[in-house]
Structure formats: structure tokens, C-alpha cells
Amino acid sequence: MREVNLHISSNAPGLLKRIKTGHQTTDRTAGKSFRRVRRGLVLFTIVYLLLFQIPQVSAAGITRGPYLQQGTSTSVVLRWRTDAPADSRVIYGLNPSALTYNIEQPTYTTEHELQLTGLKPDTKYYYAIDTYDVVMTGGDEAHSFVTAPPAGTNTPTRVWILGDSGSAGPDAEAVRDGYVAYSNGQTPDFWIMLGDNAYGDGLDDEYQTAVFDMYPGFLKSSVLWSTIGNHDGHSAYSYDMSGPYYDIFTLPTDGSAGGVPSGTEAYYSFDYGNIHFICLDSFDSDRGPGSAMLAWLEQDLLETTQDWIIAFWHHPPYSKGSHDSDEENELIEMREYALPILEDYGVDLVLSGHSHSYERSFLIDGHYGSSDTLTGNMIVDSGDGDEYGTGAYKKLTGGTAPHEGAVYVVAGSSGKISEAPLDHPVMYRSLLNLGSLELNISDGFLDARFIGTDGAILDSFTINKGNVPLSGAALQG
Amino acid sequence: MINSSTKTYITCALCTVLLLVFSVPAFPHSGLPEQIAEISLRIAEDTGNPYLYMKRGELYRNHQDRAKARSDFEMAGKIAPDLPLVHLFLGKINLESGNIVAAKSALDKYLGHITDNAGAYDLRARILIQMQKPLQAANDYTRAIELTANPKPDLFLARARALAAAGPPHISEAIHSLERGMHQVGPLVVFHEAALELEIRDKRFKSALKRIDDLISDSARKEKWMEKRGNVLLLAGHPDDAKEEFKKALQSLEELPSHRRNVRAQAALEARLRAHLGS
């Protein structure tokens, strides 16, 4: 008996087929067997290709997103994932029943990313994901977005802030639902995640449950910005922008969203109307003097002409929550090295997470040492910041001016809470409550509200710039 | 941004992930002291696990307790002397503690086994800088850059600084390192500033002026570049042109609203300009 071993095409799962043939006495017999085998192979290959290799366009379904990234006044990035390779095509327009524009990328992929450009500022667009002229999803109110207003314009702006929301469980759901209840389902202009977006290690499947399955409505109608947290950093590296965090987010490296080019997604800035947002990397980028990040920060602050400066990163410069800002490297270094630069250029608000609690400071300036070095003259306004209490925190200058004070907020309880002393002396209010933060900025006022899981306001404060007198409408809230 | 880099430059980071996933639960709930306490309990149950010691050592390091961190890394080394990762952690803690020779030795041991870890080359380069061996440091920075698909700006800056520290014969190469950074990462201001400093140091006034002119045309705020232009013109032996440049810079500053002039950097700039102009 002669045995013939055949190794099937390497596209197939490895198969070794052993064919036993009879003793071959003539070439004709051998030829017949060979033709039979060849026919079988051809049939197998055709069936295999049909079943497994040809892109199943009609069967490609969306498994992630769509979600909006890097929104500007004239552009937005739209991303989604499919369960099978497909081309990428988006149709969009000013009317859900008239999506007259389109953009496409014919390359087959499962990770889709298209940038819509040439948009009008402060304009609502509807969109649909479309492949082979079959609308896969969209073309309705849920699939719409509003572009940012032109940079420098004073436009009422609403921002939703989540910190350490990545627990992917009932606590994160409760925070989300609490905000939905509070806002009556209104979509924020954009939203920000303060890091630790997906526990335990920021892996792709963890992001699926903690972010994409948790906030699908927000993702498809409002641009999401983010900073990297230490848990995201378990699997992602600012060193070379690799890993799920950097794969998932599209963040500006070239200054195209406003601000100075940073060359990295780890830290960046963007404008929204007359507000300049700065994202820093407190975890994985060099934080010391002479570092590229701090050099970029100073140049970025020098060049911005916006009236408001809001900075955010993961590790809080002040906290006595589940992390102590007197004892941990990242927190200390951000306080010692980044804050002097930010305050010198007139930062108004700094947002962080990491500690699983809510902590909100007085209006303060110049406190760069440990908590026991705080002195009275570092507290610019020791009131509650509440328009209906001791009054809004007032900053005299309408634009940015050095050292008029800033409020520091730790908003790291959007997914869980952890017991802690919560007694940092710069804090006006410290709460061990699940919740999220909403900012409303307009006409020289920044109103911040910490919203609990039942939609109630657990804390609020206002920063008033330029000594604008309160109008009747403002007083009524 | 979608990044499908096939190069996993930081083997130790992967090991850290393995360490966290397989040996240690993630800690979404606790602060550092609680995490340390939890790991200590696990160590008590599994005293022969080097990864637990390394994890606790990292927590101690983040908690600024370097002595305990080193002790844990050394214990991990005793348990698993052939585990390269231990040497990486020891290198880091020794560098932070100022034990430069021990840090170098540890990194040499690590890189003797693992040759594709960009982070380790970066770390050893910093050690070599402290040992006043800038050329060797520059070589390590070069290797780190080569191993990284999307290198961060700091690597190019550090390499340029190392070459510059090696002396005048290496200034050209230092500037080239920054130009390479501009090509690979983007024309960042931080690269231009560093290149400008080197050009001025090396008396390459023509190229310095050209660079400043490009920066002036690209920047919204031009005053600091105008001052630099004036300084270069002074060094190049053109005091009258320099004075004109300082006047233009001061005039531009004076047109700013007062709250922008009061920024510390701007106030300092104004003071320098006035000093140049004798006013």
C-alpha cells in the first residue's frame, strides 16, 4: 500500500489528508486517482472560499459604535467596527431624509474610520453608515451631531464629564441614568472621560463593555474626548501610542482641533467656542521640567486667545480620596510642575479622576506643596462658589489672566466609590457619592454641577469672569 | 487613531500586563496602601512568586518608599535570578535612588537578554547621561527610537541633548536628530527651540535666523521669536538690526491687553527687551 500525504492549502485550517491508494501497476490507474483527488481539492477550495474567505458584505454587522471623535467646527471623525471586513461609507446631510453627501474608503476592514470635512460650524448633521448602497444604520435623530461653534465665539456650551467610569456594572449604569434623568435626555455638546475608562486593564473587550455597550446613545451623537488613566495604561503606552486606548481614540496630534501641535495623542488641546481645553498625560509621559509635554503646554497656553482654559488629566494634584496627593509620584509631579505653568496663564478649572470620590476646591492659587503647606493667601475665595450661597467665584478679567485663581475638581466616582479620609484642606466639598459632572459655560459664567445617581444636584459652583453682573435669567438658573 | 504596530517595544510592559492579569487582580477600588496590603497577603500565601514581589515593589515605588521597593525587587531576584524583568525593575529603582552604577549593571543584565525593549534602552540612556557618557547614551536613544513605531517627542529631544553634551563635533548630528523628529513626529515647537539653541551655540547664525523667520510666520504670538532674532543678530555682530528687532517685539507686547502682558513669561520678556533697549 502506498500512502500519499497531501497538505491542504494553508488558507484552510491545517489539514493533513492521508490517502491510501492501491498498489499502482499502471499510469492510467494513478492518473484517475489523481484527477479524483484534484477534483475534490478544487471543490473543497471553492466551498471554503465561499464560506469563509469572501467578505460577507451583506452579513457584516456593526459591533462597535458608531462613535464620534475629534470634533471641530468644520469636521468630525466617525468610527465603527464590523464583525466582518467591509468597505467604509458614510452618507450625511442636513436632513435625515436627504443625506446627500457621502464619503467612502473602499479598503476592506473591520475598523472603520472616516473624517467628514468641509462642514459648517454650529450645524446639525444627520448621518448613516452605508455599505454597498444598503443603509446599515443611521439616517435618524439618534445618528446626528452638531459641529462645534467657530473658535472664539461665545456660545452656550454643555459638557458632560465622567471619571473612572470603567466598572462596566450597575454603578456606572446608575451614574449614566442619573445624568440622563437630570438632563431630560438632552445630548451634551461633547463629553470627556477622565481616564480609567475600562477596568481592569483597558483591554479591548473591557472597553467594549465599559464604554461602547454602556453609552451607545451618547457615543453616536456627541464627540467623546479622553485622557489616559493608569488602568488604561496597563495595556496602552504613551511611549509609542500603542495599545487599545490609543487604537480606540482618535485624538489630535497636529493642532487641527485648535492649539499647538503636540505630536502625540497622549496630550493635546482643542477649542470649543471661546473655551480652550487642554488634556495632559499624568501617567505615561515625562512630567518633569524640560519635558516635551510641559514645553508644549507652555507654548499652547501662550498661543491660545480663548477666554476660558479648562485642563484635564487623570491624577489629581489635590486629593485625599482613595489616592493621596501628598504621597504619590504622579499627583505630586503634576502639582509641582504643571500647575505653576497653568496658573501662570490663567487656567480656570482643572478636572481629574483617579480617586473614587468627588472633591471640589475653593478658588485657589499658588499651592504647589504638600497639603500641610497651604496658607490662607493661597485661597483666593473661601466661599462656597454658589450663586445662591456666598456667591460665585469671581475672576476680574474677562479673558485669561495669571493667578486669579482656579477651581480643582476630582470627579472620579462615575463607576465606583472608595472609602477615604476626604479631608484635603483645599477642598470646599468632598463627597463619597457616585456621580458625574456637568459644565455649562456661557457669557462669562461657568456653572458646574455634580449630579448623583438619582439625578439630584449634589454640589454646584459658579466661576464668573470679567465681573459680569448676574442677569435675572442667570439667577433663576 | 488606529495603530496596528507589530512591534511590542516594551517587553516588560507586556510582562507587567501578564503580571497583573495572571498573578495579581486589578485594583479598581483601592488606594496604594490598600493595594500593598492586599499584595502582602498574597505574598504570605505564595512566597515563591517573584511577580508578586515585583508588583508590590512597583506599588512601593509609586508610594515613594524606595527602600521597600528595592527590597522587594531584590527578593524577586533571589527567587528568580534568571528572570530578566527583575533587572529592569532594579535598574529603575536604583536610578531613582541615585545608585547609578548599580542601575547600569542591572540594565546591562536586562538588555543582555532582551534586546528589543525601547523603554529599557531609554532608561539605560538616562543612566549613561548621569555617568557622563553622552555618546553611549545617544546610541541607546537611537536604539529606542528605532524600536518604536511612533516615538514620543522626548526621545528625539533626549538624543539631541546627549549628542550636544558630547561636544561641538556632535552638534550637527544633534540638530539632525531634531530634524528627524520633525520629520517623524511633526514640526513641533519644542524641536525647533532645541535646534535653535544648538545653532546659536554653534554660531550657525544664518540657519538660526532662517528657522526663526519660519517660526515667526507660523506662530500666533511672535514676541519671543522676535527677541530670539534680536539675540542672534547681536551675536552675529549686527547691533543696530538687533535693536530694531527688540523694538518691534516690545511694540507687539505693548499692544497686548494687560492681562496677557502680566503672564510671568511675558513680563520677564518685556523686562529683558527694555534692558536691551536701555529703557
Image (cartoon, coloured by chain):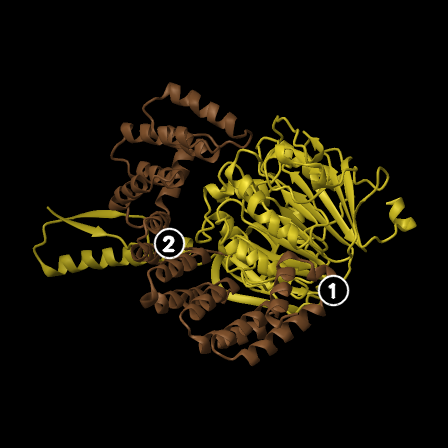
Chain colours: A yellow, B brown
Amino acid beneath label 1 = Pro
Where does the C terminus of chain B fall, quadrant-wise? bottom right
Label 1, residues with CA under 10 Å away: few <14, some 14-19, many ≥20: few
Residue located farthest toward the front when viewing the structure as drawn: B278
- Where residue A413 appears, as percent x and y from the top left, is 64, 35
- Where residue B223 appears, as percent x and y from the top left, is 62, 69
State whether residue A215 is above or below residue A48.
above
State whether residue A326 is above or below residue B39.
below
- Where residue B136 appears, as percent x and y from the top left, is 29, 55
Give me the residue at 57% from left, 32% from top. Answer: A324
- Where residue A17 appears, as percent x and y from the top left, is 23, 48
Q: Is residue A3 visible?
A: yes
Front position in the image: B51 or A403: A403
Work out whether mark 2 precedes mark 1 in sequence or the reverse, and give the earlier one: 2
**Chain letter belonging to callout 2:** B
**Chain letter belonging to callout 1:** B
Q: Which residue carries the number 2 mark?
A: B6
Q: Nearer the viewer, mark 2 or mark 1?
A: 1
Front position in the image: B245 or B119: B245
Q: Quadrant of residue B112?
A: top left
Q: Is residue A17 left or right of residue B90?
A: left
Disc 2 to disc 1, C-alpha distance: 51 Å
Name the disc covering residue B257, or none.
1
Q: Secondary structure at mark 2?
A: loop
Q: Is residue A123 left or right of residue A23?
A: right
Q: Are marks 2 and 1 on the same chain?
A: yes
Name the disc covering residue B122, or none.
none
